[in-house]
Amino acid sequence: MPERRDPPPTDEGWYALHDFRSLDWDEWRDSPERDQDRALSEVIDQLESMIAVEDSDEGATALYSILSHKADLLLVHLRPTSADIGALERQFETTAFAEYTERETSFVSVTEASGYSERAREYFEGELDEGDGLYNYMQTRLYPEIPDATHVCFYPMDKRRDPEQNWYDLSFEERADHMDAHGDIGRDYAGKVVQMITGAVALDDHEWGVTLWGDDLVDMKDLLYEMRFDPSTSKYAEFGSFYIGRRIPPSDLSALLAGERVPTDAAYENETTAAVHPDEAVESADHGGDGHDHSGDAEESGDSATSGGRPEPDVTDVEQVTDEQMEQRLAPLGLHPGDDYSDGDFALALYSDADAQELAEEVDGLRGNFEHYDSHVMTAVRADGGESVIVSIWDAERAADTAEGFLTDLPGVSRSVRGPLTVEGTSSDEDAETQDADDGATDDTAAIREELADLDVYAGKPHGEDIYALVLYSNADHDELVEEVESLSDGFDRYDTHEGTSVYEDPDGETAAVVSLWETQDAADTASGYLTDLPDIVGWADEGEGFGTMGMFYTVKPQHREDFTQKFGTVGGLLAEMDGHRETRLLVNTDDENDMFIASQWDSKADAMAFFRSDAFTDTVDWGRDVLADRPRHVFLA
């Protein structure tokens, strides 16, 4: 009997209608001015009445001016029932203004909450109370607000069902992994892009509708462009037409039709969505259903912008302080640099007159959701001089901003102190290699890097910057591989986080190494989905038995290239006699013969570290200072 697939559970909320209209400009221009005035007055009154529904918590409506030939206007309606949105369609058709319009297209769907994680299952099994953070978050997905953002982008999408790329043939775990990685990308756009996912299976021609809101269209473009490189999109997503619009108040319809810039109210045009949905700041390990959740889908937080704005900080006293002042605030609370936070983190201290023990119980729910996010460092309650203090630390101010909206809703909070954190010495120390290993490294890798730092071997942060390296090996034809990698690298170059992708050739063997360097782990993870599609990949550098080390940035001064290769031969002879050594290869960048890469395989970590501690290695490092144009680093250790 065929294996039964396990779809993620779903819950549904409001029905959604995206109604696209085009104006018959010839008929409009030919109509008498009095008829135009009467038609506009009637439809403006009707639209303002529809928009006012938000005050009664029964849905939402927004009007947009569409850019391009695809339509002129977009009405977005959210309502409790299908009868409600059906009535809204007919009500618009009864107006005189509707006689001048034609419907270009429409999309019917329903707001949807779904999930893959165990925590989300608790919601669907009815195990969460109404005060739980995840429960509240799910409600915002089901009953979203429409943010006051300048722009909207809407598109429908499906999950691919090709024979070789069928989303619905993947296991539950595979789909969950894809959605988790996909949501990670959206975290970079927290505070910039707000998102709503609506389900349309059996309701319309596509399976989901994606609505994005933001003040800057380029943010949406950048987000969707980066998503194209993620396997959940590149392999499994199909898209319909994209529609872009600008939000306008109904009162500006006459100005719009007269060809004026709209909105006409400068204050309205300058509104921002700085306060975005919590899903974008506090992301979760559970990334929605099978739709495109771009903002980090925090189904468990209460990550991706599935609805309107996050709660605005509801305190009258907000104090911005310096890093030194913030450290002085945290020290009496038992929080210290290095132990509790790192250089570049951002802290919030919120003061409450509520009982610390009761407040701690409230904070536990939020913290459980916050901890699903890589950007979260810590959140705790402390007692201080008769007051309770909620301290929440994040690795970016933008993430802290979003969390602040939730924290200020806690009982008794009356004031907030916020500021950056600097750990003395970490940002300017010339020996930056002694800092912690990459954020995404395993505990074992971090320990190795610390040990290498003690041996004065660079281990992953050239010139004080985090570099994330991807290394894989291929047995493909050299010319074919170079062509494929050059094409990928050209695409990667569109990202500021890309530090370079190159092919390194082994002169003494058929296997080549592809090395791709990135500023952030998230970007590297996204690129990995494309690199693994290269021809004849024979494995990642950290796969297989034994232990591998990779030395990078061996950029040789041209006049010493021959000296370097001879020295490598000498060291190679020494390595061959060492216990636990399997092989070491010197590979050369096909674009620059002076750029080299050294890959070694060992029986164990202990064997490799014995070499790094040896006099022979120390002598080689000292010798290399004169012949290398840059300092070599063991950036990636497997």
Image (cartoon, rainbow, N blue to C red):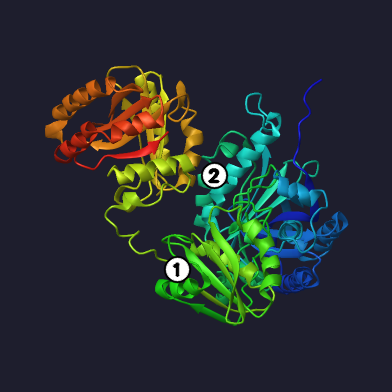
Q: Residue furthest left?
A: 559
State the residue position of label 1.
420
Q: Report x, y in % for residue 9.
A: 78, 44
Q: Residue at x 31, y 47 (%)?
A: 462
Question: Which of 599/273 is in front?
Answer: 599
Between disc 1 and disc 2, the foreground one is 1
Q: Report x, y in % for residue 237.
A: 62, 38
Q: Quadrant of the N terminus?
A: top right
Residue at mark 1 to residue at mark 2: CA–CA distance:
30 Å
Q: Residue at x 68, y 30 (%)?
A: 170
Indicate the amino acid at tag 2. Met
Can the viewer see residue 515 in this picture?
Answer: yes
Q: Earlier in the sequence, mark 1 or mark 2?
A: 2
* Circle 1 SS class: strand
Can the viewer see residue 150 in this picture?
Answer: no
State the residue position of label 2.
227
Q: Residues within 10 Å of mark 2 (few under 14, many from 20)?
A: many
Quick check: 582 left or right of 534? left
